[in-house]
Image (tube, grey):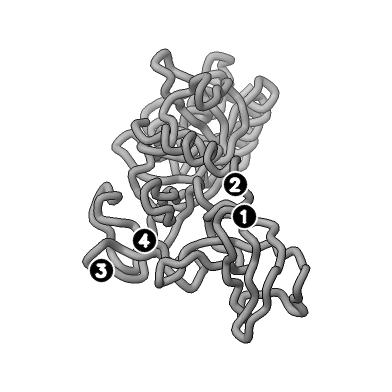
Amino acid sequence: MGRLQYVYNFVKHNLQNMSQVGKFNKLEVVNEVPFGFYLDAGDKGQILLPTKNAPLGCKLGDTVNAFIYHDSDDRLIATIKRPKVFVDHCAFLKVVSVTKVGVFLDWGLEKDLLVPFSEQDYPMSEGVSYVVYVFCDEETGRLAASTKLADFLYEESCEEGGTFEPKQEVELLICGRTDMGYKAVINGSHLGLLFRDEVFQPIKVGHSVKGYIKRVREDGKIDLCFQFHDPTARNTLEEQIIEDLIAHDGLSTLTDKSPPDEISKRFKVSKNVYKKAIGNLFRQKRILLDKTKITLVKK
């Protein structure tokens, strides 16, 4: 949370300016040269839009929607190419080179994106992809990336960063693994935890998926899940289990002790949801349970 003040300062600064580094801007073409066009970027002066990165038929007086960043010579430059990520956003990007100053990521533009060694939570390797946060360095004005997500994202549901409610649907970017499960970026602004027993589908770091807020703990930390089941949905699952038992002569080896991936493969639900369903069936005296199998009670 230490660098969230950076976000505030950066946004406040850019609201006072016509153009924003790391984003698309609508800029007027004010000069044409043999190698491209110059765009009026307000207090940032005139920025070159090279011919190869300009729209066809571009001419003086046109308004161009251009992305602004620094080129290899640290000069501001414009392009109509769309990068894989914008400033103040997270993305899953591949390391294309390791140098003395840090690693460089492929983000879809000619100049690769730097992750300085000081912004690496752990050593990064060439050819491997990582979830990073793209920020604008306050001192240099240049774009860079960081794997230290907690320095830029909120780790709690709070008034300052935004609050969440149980069962709220959110966009998740899986960003890491822990002993308890998976860490995820929530709506691009917060970090949360997806417990292992809530995972009923194959996921990997870098996957973007829809999920839900399971609960907000007393300390503000956010727990996530992939689905909520209302009573109707649970009843439907219970009937699916009964039908599966009938189809297999009244026996099933898929118990509450079975691996989560086996349960997910057959019924597309988490282990917790499955356990609740067979618990209900047992209390209704529709099935018998033991350590190795489930038996359908014959009427």
Regarding mark 4 in the picture, which secondary structure is present there? strand
Residue nearer the viewer, 34 or 4: 34
Question: Of label 3 and label 1, which has the lower sequence position?
Answer: 1
Give coordinates of residue 223: x percent, y percent. 45, 27
Regarding mark 2 in the picture, which secondary structure is present there? loop
Q: Which residue lies at the image location 41% right of the left edge and 72% below the top edge? A: 72
Give coordinates of residue 36: x percent, y percent. 62, 79
Q: Cβ–Cβ below 8 Å for labels 4 and 1?
A: no
Residue nearer the viewer, 299 or 24: 24
Give coordinates of residue 8: x percent, y percent. 49, 34
What's under tag 3, amino acid-wise? Thr
The residue that disc 3 covers is 99
Neighbour tally class for label 4: few under 14, some 14-19, many 20 plus, Cα within 10 Å: many
- Mark pair 4, 1: CA separation: 26 Å
What's under tag 4, amino acid-wise? Leu
What's under tag 1, amino acid-wise? Gly
Question: Of label 3 and label 4, which has the lower sequence position?
Answer: 3
